[in-house]
Image: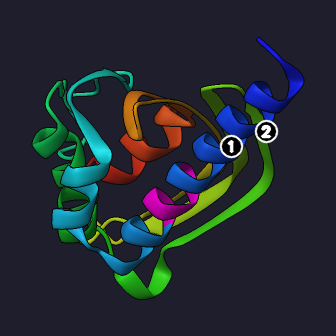
Amino acid sequence: MTATHATRTADATRAVVQEFLAARIAGDTARMVEIFADDVDWLLAENPAVPWIRPRSTGAECAAQSAELAEHTVAEDARASVDTFLVDGTDAVLMGHLSGRVRATGKTFEGPFALHLTVENGRITRHHLYENSLSIAQACTVD
């Protein structure tokens, strides 16, 4: 792979990830369905206490996750910041911090996250999210 080809690949990956983030922030599920591939390698640690965390594998299921998250959390209290955005070829890694409040319990959660995305043929084929699942589960649990 030439340096020029590698740069074009990384630029294309960055553009798709930025488009994904914009669609996610806007709550544009239809656009996210277009951005996700038909089949997605989805990884997010299953947690039965958290209603929006479940296995997913299709683009439509993956795109629906953000709507499900919004349904169960208080929008005014949701925060996410990206501190690091690394791109290497078809892979992108975003690291940052997130926080929110669960609507049903009123409890808050927070912690760091890392998101590993892979973009192939202009669509996201891998979505692996690592987050503070203990804090989120505790916020979803009624005492």
Spot the residue most to the top: 1
- Residue 60 vs residue 138: left or right? left
**Can the viewer see residue 56?**
yes
Q: Residue at x 54, y 50 (%)?
A: 17
> Which amino acid type is shown beneath numbered disc 1?
Leu
Q: Which residue is mark 1?
A: 94
As for residue 19 lying within the magenta part, the answer is yes
Callouts 1 and 2 close, C-beta under 8 Å: yes
Image quarter of residue 102? bottom left
Q: Position of residue 65 (x, y in %)?
A: 23, 50
Which is nearer the eye, 112 or 108? 112
- Quickly name the residue at label 2: 86
In the image, the segment drawn in magenta is 17-21
| Residue furthest to the right | 3
The answer to whether any part of residue 104 appears in the image is no
Magenta residues, dominant SS class = helix
* Residue at the spot 69% in from the left edge and 25% down from the top edge: 89
Dividing the image into 4 quarters, which one contains the N terminus? top right
Left or right for 24, reference 98: left
Secondary structure category for the residue under label 1: strand
Which color scheme is applied? rainbow
- Residue extending farthest bottom: 76
Among numbered discs 1 and 2, the one appearing first in the sequence? 2
